Each structure stands twice: as structure tokens, then as C-alpha cells.
Image: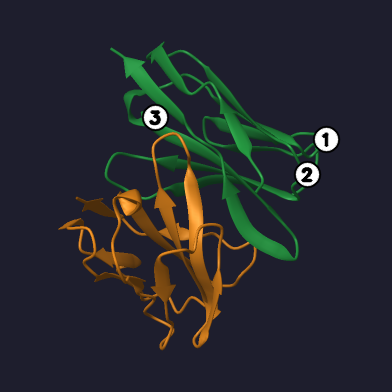
Amino acid sequence: GQQLNQSPQSMFIQEGEDVSMNCTSSSIFNTWLWYKQEPGEGPVLLIALYKAGELTSNGRLTAQFGITRKDSFLNISASIPSDVGIYFCAGSNFGNEKLTFGTGTRLTIIP
Amino acid sequence: NAGVTQTPKFQVLKTGQSMTLQCAQDMNHEYMSWYRQDPGMGLRLIHYSVGAGITDQGEVPNGYNVSRSTTEDFPLRLLSAAPSQTSVYFCASSYRHSSTDTQYFGPGTRLTVL
């Protein structure tokens, strides 16, 4: 099946730093989604992207739908302790709405 | 609204035992699905349903059965548990089977098969 590769696998940053992570695919997606999962919980949708080149923000989070439709990026500005968790990208295509999830980026904030 | 609820939260089984993981939603969502989450592999779709009476296979369906007799409930059955089924299982639902509809995830069931 399709594979979504996320990088980095894990990040250790200090509070206040900016964070960048990305997701790449071997094939095209029409929709890119970014989820956050906190310990002991299910994933929660952060941002949804529906158009190539689209840049969408949600508070301190900004995500972009890559022009090639094979990648997406998520940035977090001025990180705070509650940003800790695992961030997943997911892609889907119109007419085949099953989500394919990435392998996740684990974010840890060093006090 | 309770959202998506899953029971049990934790379960330990012996190889060969059967059990049912329960999932319910009170949002009148048409679409429901089951995923498993394994370290380093993200979430993989097991089975899904686009409405009551309709189910279909996802990416990793072997060893699992589902049924959808009501809009609210979507149980996942393991007929003969195997150690390879040790995982965290998430149920999700959305209003429609569309990538433009937000999927809401339950809190998960952590299953260990010895």
C-alpha cells in the first residue's frame, strides 16, 4: 500500500523554539491532514488541506500542501509545553476516502 | 455528547481466545472505522462502515470481523487472538465518508495477546 514517511521521527526542543516537520508520499494525495495525539488519547485533527500549494494556519500551527501533492509540512511557532505529543500526517484521495497515516513525529519539549 | 467511546480501555488475552472491542458514537455519524496503531507504523485501517448494514475491509482486515447493525455501534471482533494482534485499537467516526469531514477518534483500547 501507499507509504507516508514523516521526518524527523522525534524532536527534542526547548520551550519557545519553532518546530518544523514534514511528510512525504510515494504517490499523490488530494487531501492532507495533520493530527496530534497525546498520551493515552486518540488523534485529534489540527489542520486540513485541500488544494495544492495551500497554506493554512490554526493559531501557532501552520501547514502547507506541497505543490507536487506528494508532500506536506507542519510548523509550530514558539512551542509551549502542551505541544508535546505525536504528530501524524494523513492523506486521502477523492473517491477513495480511506486515510493513509504517516509514521508520526514525536515532539518532546525540554524545560 | 460523549463523542466516540471505546470499551474496554485495557485487555489481556491468551492466544486463541476471542473477544469483542466495543465502539459507540452519539453524533449520528454515518461513517465509522477501526484502526490499529503499532510502534513506528502509524495507524492502519482494519475495517470501515459507511452506514448501518454496510461494512468493508481496510488495509489489514485479516483476523478481525465487524458488523454495523445500528448507526451508533461498530464492534470489532477477534475470533482467535494471536500475539501479532497486540496493539492499540482506535475507533473513529465522521458525518460522512468524505475526506472533508473531520474524523473523531475514541480514546483507544490497549490489547495484549500472550
Amino acid carrying label 2: it is Ile
Q: Nearer the viewer, mark 1 or mark 2?
A: 2
10 Å neighbourhood of mark 2: few (<14), some, or many (≥20)?
some
Give chain B's shade: orange
Task: Determine the chain carrying the residue at label 2.
Answer: A
Query: Under tag 3, what secondary structure?
Result: helix
Residue B99 at least partly seen: no
Whether B61 is drawn above or below A16: the answer is: below
User: Residue drawn 55% across and 63% down?
Assistant: B58
Q: Which residue is mark 1?
A: A68
Residue B82 lies, in percent from the top left, at: 30, 56
10 Å neighbourhood of mark 3: few (<14), some, or many (≥20)?
some
Task: Determine the chain carrying the residue at label 3.
Answer: A
Q: CA distance from mark 2 to mark 3?
A: 29 Å
Are tags 2 and 3 found on a single chain?
yes
Task: Determine the chain carrying the residue at label 1.
Answer: A
Give chain A's shade: green
Amino acid carrying label 1: it is Thr
In-front residue for pair A7/B45: B45
N-terminal-most mark, 2 or 3? 2
User: Residue drawn 47% across and 48% down?
Assistant: B43
User: Residue drawn 64% across and 66% down?
Assistant: B98
Residue B9 lies, in percent from the top left, at: 21, 57
**Label 1 close to label 2 by CB (< 8 Å):** yes
Q: Which residue is mark 3?
A: A83
Amino acid carrying label 3: it is Asp
